[in-house]
Amino acid sequence: MKEKTNLYILWTNANPLTAEKMVFIYAVNSKLKGWWDNVTIIIWGATAKLVGEDLKIQNLIKEALEIGVNVTACKACVDQLGVTDLFEDLNIEVIYWGEPLTEILKNQETLITV
């Protein structure tokens, strides 16, 4: 079996401490230390609201993007919460995630849900 090299973090928990102390620490270290070739944080649900309101979280996203972590968000969520423009200004990819998430699951990719 081929070794998995992509890590996906489905981030739905809007607790700022969880974001800082788990999501971003693990994603950034995974990329910097070469634990995974590709690291993607998927912002979904309540986390879109958190990102829209919390400057510290926005800065963590900027830092993650700078070191090569992919950051993307559910378009339906950001549209409904009125933060689409902010996400695009932060260079966060905004797409509909239903089908891509289904493919990740069907392909048994490495997915952490937080």
Image (spheres, rainbow, N blue to C red):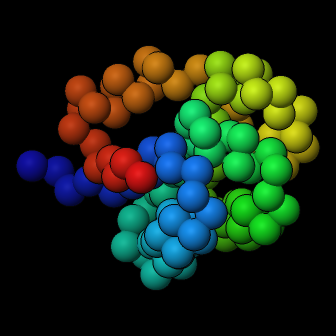
Q: Quadrant of residue 7?
A: bottom left
Q: Residue at image x 61%, y 39%?
A: 46
Q: Is residue 103 left or right of residue 27?
A: left
Q: Is residue 106 left or right of residue 85?
A: left
**Rendered location of residue 33, percent (x, y):** 46, 81
For the view shown, which residue lies furthest in the bottom direction? 33
For the view shown, which residue lies furthest in the left direction? 1
Q: Is residue 51 above or below residue 93?
A: below
15 or 102, which lies in front? 15
Q: Is residue 21 left or right of residue 67?
A: left
Q: Residue at image x 57%, y 69%?
A: 17
Q: Quadrant of residue 49?
A: top right
Q: Is residue 106 above or below residue 51?
A: above
Looking at the rendered structure, the number of numbered marks drawn on it comes to 0
Q: Residue at image x 72%, y 67%?
A: 60
Q: Is residue 95 left or right of residue 38?
A: right
Q: Is residue 67 visible?
A: yes
Q: Residue at image x 51%, y 50%?
A: 13
Q: Is residue 31 visible?
A: no
**Rendered location of residue 50, percent (x, y):** 71, 49
Q: Is residue 46 above or below residue 31?
A: above
**Rendered location of residue 11, percent (x, y):** 50, 48
**Rendered location of residue 14, percent (x, y):** 58, 51
